[in-house]
Image (spheres, grey):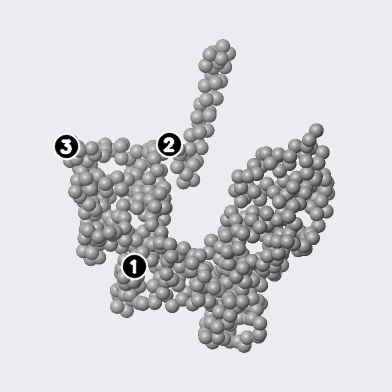
Amino acid sequence: MHRFMKMGSYGYRYARARAAALLLVCLLAAVAAWSAGVAPPFAQQRADLIVIDRLKAFGPLERPPVLFAHDRHTAALAEQNQDCLACHQMDPAKNVLSPQYRHLGTLDRRGLADLFHEGCIGCHQELRARKVEAGPVTCGDCHAEDVAVAGIREPMGLDRSLHYRHAKASENKCERCHHEYDPAAKKLVYTKGKEGACLYCHKQQTEENRISNRLASHQACIACHRDLRLQKQTAGPVECGGCHDPKQRAAIEQVGDIPRMARNQPDAALVKIQPTHPTEPSPQASMPQVAFNHQSHESYANQCRTCHHAAMTPCADCHTIQGHIDGQRVKLAQAMHQPDSTISCVGCHARRQAEAECVGCHGAINASRAWSNQTSCKVCHLAPSTPVPEPLTDEEAKALAAALVAARRTEPALLPWEEIPEIITIKHLKDQYEPAPMPHRRIVRKLTEQIQDSRLAAAFHGAPLTVCQACHHNTPASLKPPECRSCHSATPDAVNLERPGLMAAYHEQCMQCHARMKLAKPDTRDCTACHANRAT
């Protein structure tokens, strides 16, 4: 401050303006982060926030909506020996707690506003009269413009572990949760063998006579947990954070060895090709049908709807070879091969390749090169050893799928260790550093150790030299590949600017691999970790 005062009034005003501008930039960054769903650092993070804005159904809001911390109120009611019934009424038609606040049915604008004001303010005033700490009683304290709190709610669903725990607790009585609507009887019924995920019917928003997934989950799950607690039995959470808070969710007990779910699913199946319309003949595929190891994939997927995202039916029922409205016009080949999809085969495999033990090599292989030949295609589209007559019966298809799955490799093909050079000496920087001895065999051994138990790697690393291709790129697989300097000159290529010079190629290949695999040593900033200083 003294320095700016010596500069005179102009310097002082400049300093103040600069500080104000910096503050404005910080505030704008915080607002942008808030808009993007990222909590600003000063915000309290909660998973139980409910936005009370129901009056917007009648027109523009006169005041900001209310951010309601549900778990905080649940805990406060428990201290007063009250529970959910203090705010929610039982719906006699469904025998469940109504999600609406202190009423059933519909109210007009005035009635709804009065209900919330009288209920909330009245409760707070009553507690304050009894010298109990309570919430606000003035308009601006609830309808606040700036609230230093951020929602961190995560969606909740039953993974394999939670589903198994619920099935075991209910003695495998699936009808306690699963149902479908019988239009003839006009009621919900249970049909054994047709159990599906709740999201298959209950969508994001309420539709006609089907309530939203949020309402269905809260009514069914919370009601069950609450009833069990009233019976003094162990039960799941009834608070928002128990399901939607990331830390509390991470603390949920995970079952280790989960038995296979009994759903009459196949061990192996052929991915069939269906016509777009039942009256059309079955189209001919240009490649052999894929044999899918359903049993092994059950252990990789966290839940059935990881793959069966719309219904518990074969993929080709919706995704036909030409595309169908039931599959949103996504063709079968697209559904299986979209690299950026979270539910396609290729997309799922790509996420596996992005994990630390695989990304060191696969991060250096671009998509165009990965799909430049049909070697990978034949891993899945494996042709039978003898011609198979068409069409196949269900039993013949089942037997063929099992035979093709059994024919796949279960261990990666590797070179004998003695055929792999133990040390490769890099002498490119010999004028500044001692030659760098690269522990070649140890690196290859480490890479192969990380994939030796992977069935995915076993299937796609079918040739002994496959693991070599990430480093020895753009050359045919060989026990004696060309040296790096065969393509990368000592100085950058003035013609082919995409081809780095030899030193850049070495550093890019090694350092990026270490960074992708998150290796702490050698430190990429420590030159002498690889290159000892040259003795003078």
Secondary structure of the residue carrying tag 2 is loop
Are circles 2 and 3 on residues that touch, CB within 8 Å? Answer: no
On screen, residue 500 versus residue 273, left or right, reads right
Of pointers 1 and 2, the one earlier in the residue sequence: 2
Front residue of this view, candidates 420 and 520: 420
In the rendered image of this protein, does residue 485 appear above or below residue 193? above
Residue 524 can be seen, yes or no: yes
For the residues labelled 2 and 3, the Cα–Cα distance comes to 33 Å
Residue at mark 2: 42
> Residue 129's mark?
3
Q: Are marks 1 and 2 in contact (CB under 8 Å)?
A: no
Which dot marks residue 197?
none
Residue closest to the eye, 390 or 129: 390
Hey, which quadrant is residue 9 in on the image? top right
Residue at position x 51%, y 37% in the image: 29
Whether residue 8 is visible to the viewer of this picture, yes or no, is: no
Check disc 2 and give the amino acid type: Phe
Provide the secondary structure element on which disc 3 rests. helix
Residue at x 37% of width, y 38% of height: 147
SS at badge 1 = helix
Residue ID for mark 1: 168
The numbered mark, 2 or 3, whose residue comes first in the sequence reads: 2
Q: Are marks 1 and 3 in contact (CB under 8 Å)?
A: no
